[in-house]
Image (tube, grey):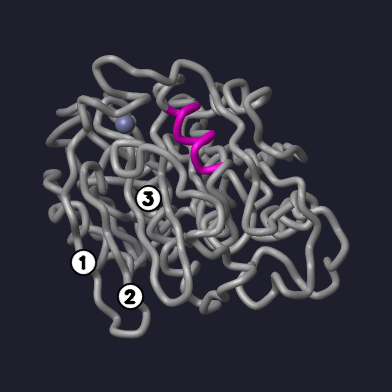
């Protein structure tokens, strides 16, 4: 990768990165050589995918089995009105290539499960979790722990969201929330609603974290949770550490293989 | 080792982008000779060169153009 010369078009397309101290041609080559698995191409995955594509991240894997629904368009900016009824991975691929044909898109039209999660995660450098349900979130987390992959986490509800970067060995989602909440206790987006711009903020924080990790610059949100409240426009930070008693990344883990939790909140 | 780049007709900031990319490739102490247009290019590129810590050894006017001699400094 390091020997590949930029084309005239790439010099122009990526000039604002190449000009940046700390990025340069070297950094742009890192981006072009990187691969990111986006779990979900919905509210969080949409803005993340658009910016990662624009930045020239070389390979984007997309996991989504869903089709575009009219109610998605209030926030899922990868998809357009004429895409309704189309597979989300297909409309996402079109949107990504419209922005940057340099990007290789790998569509995975599957529901993430204990059967496929390890293989999917293993094929990429970084995983960006843009899922909207607990079964998927726990699968992503555990698969990333087992495969030692960075897990860029984001989640949203109503008017607030949170983001953090779980680096291997530096804590995981189960260190914070050891098991999923009992069915019915946490409302889903479908029942509770979500402010359309909210996933834009959180998804772009996730994309920023991904790009920083690839470039090796700045300080990622490791061992820090950022909470965002759209109504008060406040960001709050909470520090955390790996929990030695975490059921999956602790000293004596009780979970050693992937678990398919029951779908709930009427998602199925 | 001395490389030469003819950047006449290449406008800002792409002339500097190309010089920067070339400087990333060569070793410390290597020299790069660049031919630049008058106007914006000769005002901007030398400033960027020194701002990034490289040495501007010589600037020679050549009719409508300028010949720069740059030496790479700093980390590789
Ligand atoms: Zn953990």
Q: Is residue A101 left or right of residue A184?
A: right
The residue at the point 24 percent across, 42 percent down is A222
In the depicted structure, whether residue A33 falls above or below residue A44: above
The foreground one among A86 and B19 is A86
Do badges 3 and 1 share one subunit?
yes
| Number of the label disc, if any, that sits on residue A236 | 1
- Judged from the image, the secondary structure of the residue bearing numbered disc 1 is strand
Do badges 2 and 3 share one subunit?
yes
Q: Which residue is mark 3?
A: A18
Pointer 3 local density, CA inside 10 Å: few below 14, some 14–19, many at least 20: many
In the depicted structure, whether residue A105 falls above or below residue B59: above
**For disc 1, does the CB lie below 8 Å from ligand 1?**
no
Mark 2–mark 3 CB contact (< 8 Å): no
The answer to whether any part of residue A213 appears in the image is: yes
Mark 1–mark 2 CB contact (< 8 Å): yes
Magenta residues span A136-144
Residue A59 is one of the magenta-drawn residues: no
Do badges 1 and 2 share one subunit?
yes
| Number of the label disc, if any, that sits on residue A229 | 2
The foreground one among B53 and A41 is A41
Q: Quadrant of the C terminus of chain B?
A: top left
Q: Is residue A194 left or right of residue B7?
A: right
Pointer 1 local density, CA inside 10 Å: few below 14, some 14–19, many at least 20: few
Q: Which is the main secondary structure of the residues drawn in magenta?
A: helix
């Amino acid at each position: 990768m390091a020997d590949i010369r930029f084309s005239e078009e790439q010099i122009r397309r990526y000039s604002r990165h190449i000009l940046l101290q700390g990025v340069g041609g070297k950094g742009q080559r890192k981006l072009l050589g990187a691969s990111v698995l986006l779990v979900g191409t919905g509210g969080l995955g949409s803005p993340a995918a658009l910016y990662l594509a624009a930045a020239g991240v070389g390979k984007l894997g997309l996991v989504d089995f869903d089709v575009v629904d009219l109610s998605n368009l209030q926030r899922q900016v990868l998809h357009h009105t004429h895409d309704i009824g189309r597979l989300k991975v297909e409309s996402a691929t079109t949107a990504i290539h419209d922005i940057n044909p340099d990007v290789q898109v790998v569509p995975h039209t599957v529901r993430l499960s204990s059967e496929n999660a390890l293989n999917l995660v293993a094929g990429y450098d970084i995983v960006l979790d843009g899922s909207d349900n607990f079964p998927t979130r726990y699968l992503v987390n555990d698969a990333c722990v087992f495969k030692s992959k960075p897990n860029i986490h984001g989640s949203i509800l109503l008017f607030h969201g949170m983001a953090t970067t779980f680096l291997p060995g530096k804590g995981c989602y189960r260190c914070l929330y050891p098991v999923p909440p009992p069915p019915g206790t946490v409302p889903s987006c479908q029942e509770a609603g979500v402010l359309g711009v909210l996933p834009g903020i959180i998804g772009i924080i996730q994309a920023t974290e991904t790009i920083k990790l690839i470039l090796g610059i700045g300080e990622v949100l490791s061992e820090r949770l950022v909470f965002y409240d759209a109504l008060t426009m406040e960001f709050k930070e909470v520090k955390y550490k790996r929990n030695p008693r975490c059921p999956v990344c602790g000293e004596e883990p009780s979970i050693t293989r992937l678990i398919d939790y029951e779908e709930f909140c009427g998602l199925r | 080792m001395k490389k030469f780049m003819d950047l006449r007709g290449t406008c800002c900031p792409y002339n500097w982008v190309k010089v920067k990319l070339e400087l990333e490739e060569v070793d410390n102490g290597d020299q790069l000779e660049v031919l630049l247009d008058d106007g914006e290019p000769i005002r901007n590129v030398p400033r960027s060169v020194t701002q990034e810590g490289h040495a501007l050894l010589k600037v020679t006017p050549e009719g409508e153009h300028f010949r720069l001699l740059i030496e790479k400094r700093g980390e590789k």
